[in-house]
Image: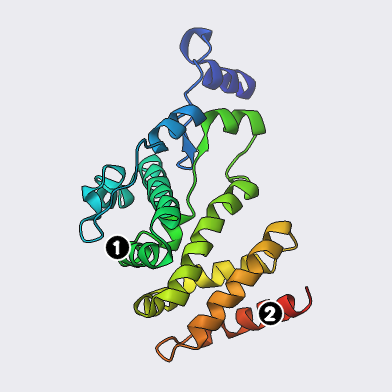
Amino acid sequence: MEAGGSQNSETGNGGAVKPLQPKVRRSSVSSLSGTEIEQRMTEKGAVELDLLRPESSAWLKGIFKQIRSGDLETRFCALWRFKDVFNNMAVAKGSGQITRFAAYMLEQGILEEGVYFAKPVTAGEFAARGLESEVPSDRHEYDKKPALGILLQLSVWSKQARSTICSRTVFLRRVLRDCMARSEFAQEMIERVVVTSRTLLQDETCNLVVLFDELLDVSFRALLR
């Protein structure tokens, strides 16, 4: 009886096999293909930006709404638009202009740790790589480099932004711990992280005592390079 009951529970009434149920897509998996994501991120033409009205730029129209969206794909594409503008301004406008722009975006929450490092895995990559829940580390690292470059610019050129950066202790702890990894990426990022940390520590408004252990570890790692 037990065996028969078990069989009926699997096949249902009449012995018919139940159809396969669709799998629930993980929140970290994008339904877009790589090409579709690239098309969303690509902007044409020169960057014209009014720092007092960033959304007046065609590149940044609606970016504040999108950056706070609950949809991972929308946030991801908005962040890449921001980085495209930042990189273009670095060439055309110089460090002073892009630093003021980045400081403004920081105040708007653009550089929040939980959002800025988010990058979805496309469905094709998910199937091809056999991933389950983790985004490949090299993809994460590719996203982190622009973030760290922006932080370094902000800490050096914008005194007003330093207290905001110092308040992001979760973000800073994650960055410092990334520097301790035994990877090529950690070696590449450690110098700019040390410079950023030193600049923040020199500012009397910044209190990083909660990160003392991590700062000490990274400093020793930098000395032993």
Q: Are marks 2 and 1 in contact (CB under 8 Å)?
A: no
Amino acid residing under circle 2: Asp
Seen at 49% across and 82% down, the residue is: 200
Q: Earlier in the sequence, mark 2 or mark 1?
A: 1
Picture layout, residue 220 above or below residue 132:
below
State the SS at label 1. loop
Way the structure is coloured: rainbow
Q: Residues within 10 Å of mark 1 (few under 14, many from 20)?
A: few
**Drawn side of residue 19 relative to residue 77, left or right:** right
Q: Quadrant of residue 95?
A: bottom left
List x then y, in percent, for residue 74.
35, 42
Nearer the observer, 202 or 29? 202
List x then y, in percent, for residue 126.
58, 33
Picture layout, residue 150 above or below residue 22:
below
**Drawn side of residue 65 relative to residue 30, left or right:** left
Seen at 65% across and 69% down, the residue is: 190
Q: Which residue is mark 1?
A: 108
Q: Is residue 22 visible?
A: yes
List x then y, in percent, for residue 193.
59, 71
List x then y, in percent, for residue 196.
54, 75
Amino acid residing under circle 1: Gln
Seen at 34% across and 78% down, the residue is: 160
**Drawn side of residue 49 relative to residue 26, left or right:** left
Q: Quadrant of the C terminus?
A: bottom right
Picture layout, residue 217 above or below residue 144:
below
Q: Is residue 31 visible?
A: no
State the SS at label 2. helix
Q: Which residue is mark 2?
A: 217
Q: Quadrant of the N terminus?
A: top right
How many labels, in total?
2
